[in-house]
Amino acid sequence: MLDVFTLFLFNIIVYNIPLLYGTTGEIMIEKSGSLNLGVEGTMAIGAVVGYLAGAKTDSLLVACLVSFIASGLVGALFSFLTVTLQANQNVTGLTITTFGVAFYYFIGNALSNSAGGWPKLNGTAFDMQSQPIHIPFISDIPFVGKALFSHGILVYVGILIAVLMWFYFNKTVPGLKLRAIGENPAAADSLGVNVTLYKYTHIIIGSGIMGLGGLYMGLNLGGAFEGSNCWINGYGWISIALVIFANWSPAKALLGTLIFGFFNTLRVQNAALAYAFPDALGWLTKIPSHFFSALPFIITLIVLIISSLTSKGRSGEPQAIGRNYYREDR
Amino acid sequence: MRKYHLVRRADAQFKRTLIYYAIGILVSLTIGAVILAALGINPFEYYGRMFSIGLIGNRYGYKSIEGLLKIFVPLLITSLALSLSFKMRFWNIGGEGEFLIGAIAASIVAFNCSGLPNFVTVLLMCLAAMISSGIIGIAVAALKVKFNTNETLMTLMLNYIMLYVIRYLGETKAEWNFFLEEESERPIFGTFPETAFMGGIPIGPFKLLWSVIFAVLLTVIVYVYLKYTKQGYEISVVGDSSATAKYAGMSVGKIVLRTMFISSALIGLAAAFTVSAAGTISDTITNDVGWTGIIVAWLSKLSIPAVFVTAVLISILQYGCQAAATQYPAIDINYADLLQGLILFSVLVADFAANFRIVRKEDAKNA
C-alpha cells in the first residue's frame, strides 16, 4: 500500500521537473521586464538539438551544454528582436513557439526518413548517465528514499537552479538591479544600470534553462521521436501559467511545480489509486482526465483574476512587463 | 559612452517599407531554400510546386482552390477580428479558445436542429457561435477594464481550457453526448445533418461557398468600419493613448467592451463557417488560426487591405506545403510553419530598418 504512495510521489517529481526548468527560466526573463511567450518553442529546440548532440557524442554533459546554447541562441534572437529592434514581445514570442515546434517536427521527420534513422537512446552511455543515481544509504531509506532521493542528475540540477535563482534575486546586487529594470527600466537606466546588457544576459540564460527542461523531457520519454507528439506537449504553456501561480518567485515555483505535478500525476494514476483504495478513492475514476489536464490553466486563471482584485502591492509581477524600453522616449 | 544610437524616422514611407518587406521575405525564402537543398531537394522545383498549390498539370485543379479556400476563410476572418482588438492595444491572444467556443456552439445547433431548412440552420449556427464567443470576449474585456487583469495571460489560459473541453466532448462516450457518432464503438465526432452544411453557388464542378463571399464582404465592412465610422475612430484613439481618449470625453471602458465583443464574435463566426463547411467538428478544427491570425495581423501592420493580401499568401504557403507533400514525403506541413516563422522574424527586422535610423552620436549632436 505504501508502494502506491511512493510511486505517486516519485512520479510527481520525475515527470514534472521540466515544469520547474520552464518556470524558473521564464521567471528570469520576466523579471527583466520581458514577457516571452516562446517557452514551448524554446524548449522544443533545446530538446531536439541537445538530444541529437548527446546521441552523437554519447555524453549527457555535451547534450546539456548544446541544449543550453541552442535555446540560449533562441533567447538571443528574442532579445535582438525585442530589445534592440523594439519588436512586439507577444508576437515575437508566439512566433518563436510556432517556429520552434515546427523545427522540432521538421528535424525529427527529416531524420526519421533518412538512411540512418532517428538515433536511439536505449542502452547507450548517454542513456546510462540520465538514469536515476543511487546514493548509498539515503536512497535506501524506506518511502522517502525512493520518492525523493533516487532520481536522475537533471532533477537535482533543476532544484539547484531554483534555489540559486532565489538567492540571486534576493541576496545579490545584480539580482536587485535586474528586478529594478523589470519594475522601471528608465529609473534603473538613470542610475547607471546597463539595461540592454542586463536584458540580453538574462533572457539568454533564462532561455538556456528552458532548453535543459526540454532535453530532460526528451530523455524522460526515452528519446523516441513520434511524428505526431512533441516531447514538450504543452509543458511550456503550463510553465507560463506556473510563473503567475508562483507569483514570480523561484522558491514558490518549486512548490507550484509539486502542486501542478500532483494534479498531473493524479490524471495518470487515478486508476491505480482507486484500485488500491476502492472505498476511499474510488470516486477518482469518475473524474475525466481532461479535467486534470485543464486544471493548471483553470487554477491560474482564477489566481490571475483574484490577484488583480486584491492590492497590487504584494504581487511579484514586474510592473514594466511586456513593454519595450526605448531610451529616446524616456 | 555609446557611439551610435537609434532615431525613429520622421517620415515612414510606404514605398520604403514595402521594399524592405520584400527583401525580408526574399531572405527568409532563401534560408528556406538552403534548408531544402541541405536535404537534397531542388528548392526551385519545390517552391514551384508549393506556390502553384498543385494547380498545374492537375485535372482536378478546382479541388486545390476549394482546399485553399478552406484554409483561407477562417484565417482571414480571424486575422480581421484580431486586428480590431490589436488596434486598441488589447492583447487578445485567445483566438484559439474563442474559435473553439464558437465551433462547439455552432455544433450544438447543428446536431439538434435537423428539422429546419438549410438557410435557417446555418444562420442559427452563426448566431449561436457569435454570441457565445462574444460573451467570452466581453467577460475578458470587463475584467481588464474593471480590475486591469492581464488580458494576454487570461486569453492564453482560456485557449487551453477550451482545448480540453472539446477533447472531453470528443472522447467521452455517454448518453448525453450528442456530439459523437452513435454507431461507432470508438468515440469519434459525428457528421452534421445535411441541413447544417454551408451552401454555395456551383460553377461547373466547383462550388463557391457563401462563406467565401461573405468573408470577402466582411473585409470591406471592417475596412469601412475602422476608417469611416465614429466607432472605428474611437478604437484608434484608445489604441494611441487611453488617456487622450479619456480627456476627449470618450468612455474607454465601453469602447473596449464593444470592440472585444465584435472581435470575439467574428472569431466565433469564422468557427461557425468552418464547422459548417467541414460538416463536422474536431479538436484540430482551428487549424491554429488563433496563432497564425496573430502573425497575419502583425505582418500586415494591422492594415485591413494588407490583412487580406497576407492571409491569401499565408494560405497559399500552408496549402502549397500540403499539396507538395504528395511529391516530397520528407517535407511535411511543418515546413510551412518554419517558413512562416522565418518570414515574420525577417519582416520584424525589415520593419525596424524602415522605421529607425542608426545615427552616430556626434552627427546627432551637430544636427
Image (cartoon, coloured by chain):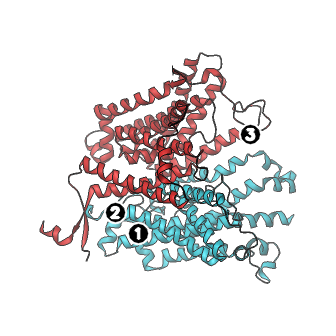
Chain colours: A cyan, B red
In terms of image quadrants, where is residue B247? top left
Q: Which mark is residue A199?
A: 1
Observer able to see residue A86: yes
Please tell me whether residue A113 is drawn above or below residue A49 in the rendered image. Answer: above
Q: Callout 1, which amino acid?
A: Lys
Can I make out residue A241 in this image?
A: no
A325 and A300: which is toward the camera: A325
* Circle on res. B172: 3
Q: Dot 3 lies on which element?
A: loop
How many discs mark residues in the rendered view?
A: 3
Q: Give the residue displayed 78% in from the left and 84% down from the top.
A: A136
Label 2 sits on a secondary structure element that is: loop
Same chain, marks 1 and 3? no
Nearer to me, A82 or B36: B36
Amino acid beneath label 3 = Thr
Report x, y in % for residue A111.
Answer: 63, 61
Question: Label 2: which residue?
Answer: A325
